[in-house]
Structure formats: structure tokens, C-alpha cells
Amino acid sequence: MKKLMCVPLLWASVSVWGACESGFPEELPVVPAGDQATTEQMYEAQKATLDYVEAGKRYLNCARNLNQWAFDRKVDSLREVADAYNKELARFKEQNSLIAGS
């Protein structure tokens, strides 16, 4: 009976390990200047930013061997990317409201 209980636990640990094999995303998403971007470019930047943040969150959820400093740096990186996109999105919306109001 003990052998049968170990197999599911081993399988669960292998699947969690497998989720971290990709590592933390290295390539930052490209975010265009909001005051010069098209709607299509901003949409692509949104998708790339969300994909980057989600991949980073998945990595952080399964990377148990990171020390607190390394973990915090990775979280800061995710926040910086999201903040950069949000800043350009605000510029994009402002530019488009100026054009629409003309």
C-alpha cells in the first residue's frame, strides 16, 4: 500500500518541476511610444505584456529555490514592465482623445 501512495506524490512533484523548466522570461515585451502608436501596436503590446507577466508569475509560483532578494527582483521586473505599458497606454489614450476632439 505504501508503494502505491508514493507514485502519485512522485508524479505530482515531477509535474510541478516540469512547470518551471522554462525559467523566468528573459525577453522583455516591446512597448511602443503611446503618443505615436496605432491601435494595433498597442493591442500587440498589451498581449505581449500580459504574456510576459503571466509567464513570470508562473515561474515565481513554482520556483521554490529563490532567495528573497532574487524573488523580489523578479517581482520588481514584472511590475516595471506592467508600469511601462500602462504609462504608454495612458499616453495613447490621451493622444487619441486629443485627435477625436479636434
Image: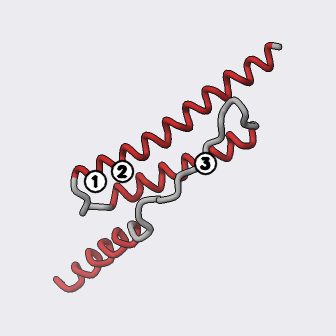
The alpha-carbon separation of the residues under discs 3 and 1 comes to 24 Å
Which residue is label 3 attached to? 30
Q: Quadrant of the C terminus?
A: top right
- Cα separation, mark 2 vs mark 3, equals 18 Å
* Between discs 2 and 3, the one toward the N terminus: 3
Q: How crowded is mark 3: few (under 14 residues within 10 Å), some or many (20 or more)?
A: some
- Where does residue 61 sit, x and y in percent of width and height? 34, 56
Image height of 8 relative to 39, above or below:
below
Which label was assigned to residue 70? 1
* Residue type of the residue flagged with mark 1: Ala
Looking at this view, name the residue that lies furthest to the top: 101
- Separation of marks 2 and 1 at Cα, in angstroms: 6 Å
Residue at 55%, 46% in the rendered image: 49
Please report the residue visible at 69 percent of the width from the left and 29 percent of the height from the top. 35
Q: Do the residues labelled 2 and 1 touch (CB within 8 Å)?
A: yes
Residue in front for this viewpoint, 93 or 5:
93
Residue type, numbered disc 2? Lys
State yes or no: discs 2 and 3 in contact (Cβ < 8 Å).
no
- Give the residue displayed 48% in from the left and 51% down from the top: 54
Q: Quadrant of residue 92?
A: top right
Q: Which residue is drawn at 73% across and 19% down?
A: 97
Return the x and y of residue 25 as percentages of the image width and height: 47, 59
Residue 43, relative to residue 87: is it above or below? below
Question: Quadrant of residue 93 in the image?
Answer: top right
Q: Position of residue 68 (x, y in %)?
A: 22, 51
**Residue identified by numbered label 2:** 74
Element type at mark 1: helix
